[in-house]
Amino acid sequence: MKKAVTFFYAIILATLCSAQQYISSSSLVGTKWLHVNQVSEKKAFKFYYTFTRRNMTTQNVEDPRGIRYTYYLTDKIPQSYDKSKVGKPSKGCYLVEYNEIAEEMTYHTIKSFNRKTGRLILYRNYDPKRIGSSACDIVLTRVKK
């Protein structure tokens, strides 16, 4: 009996410690988010993230050009990009994006999503294959929808 109780508590603890949240793609479609990367007291870079059914666009606030990625959500860490999932309703705790120009896939872990406060936190994993890659949280604040 003690083993069963210990096992039950271990499952609950693992669930509570999991820093992932499942969301649906419909929660993102038509939304615009702001990310502020504060690099010093006096310097911050601001980026917009905009989601359509098929694309996620990142754009520096000071530069009208943006980078467009196709994306989908999944519940498993992706080993490769599955473009058959793009534009279709999806759910998951990983946001998978693909830059068609660079032919490069990246994924983010969805740490939290709060529709009421308009806050989305993504975790970008360190990728040793990418120059300048670092692990970090990307905190987004909704500005539209």
Image (tube, rainbow, N blue to C red):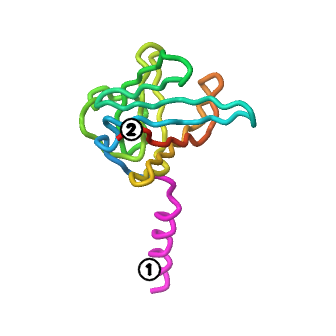
Q: Amino acid at mark 2?
A: Lys
State which quarter of the image contains the C terminus: top left
State which quarter of the image contains the N terminus: bottom left
First-in-chain label (1 vs 2): 1
Is residue 93 inside the magenta stretch? no
Give the magenta-colored segment's residue range: 1-20
Residue at horizontal 58 percent and vertical 42 percent from the top: 137
On residue 31, the disc is none
Q: Secondary structure at mark 2?
A: strand
Q: Is residue 31 left or right of residue 46?
A: left
Above-or-below relation of 135 to 17: above
Residue at horizontal 37 percent and vertical 30 percent from the top: 71
Q: Is residue 86 left or right of residue 121?
A: left
Is residue 15 inside the magenta stretch? yes
- Between 125 and 26, the one lying in front of the other is 26
Q: Are marks 1 and 2 in contact (CB under 8 Å)?
A: no
Which residue carries the number 2 mark? 144
Residue at horizontal 32 percent and vertical 30 percent from the top: 52
Asked where in the image residue 124 lies, by quadrant, the reply is top right
Q: Secondary structure at mark 1?
A: helix
Q: CA distance from mark 1 to mark 2?
A: 48 Å
Residue farthest along the top direction in this orientation: 101
Image coordinates of residue 17 in percent, x first then y, are: 53, 62
Asked where in the image residue 133 lies, by quadrant, the reply is top right
Residue at horizontal 54 percent and vertical 23 percent from the top: 60
- Between 142 and 136, the one lying in front of the other is 142
Above-or-below relation of 62 to 46: above
On residue 4, the disc is 1
What's the magenta bit mostly, secondary-structure-wise? Answer: helix
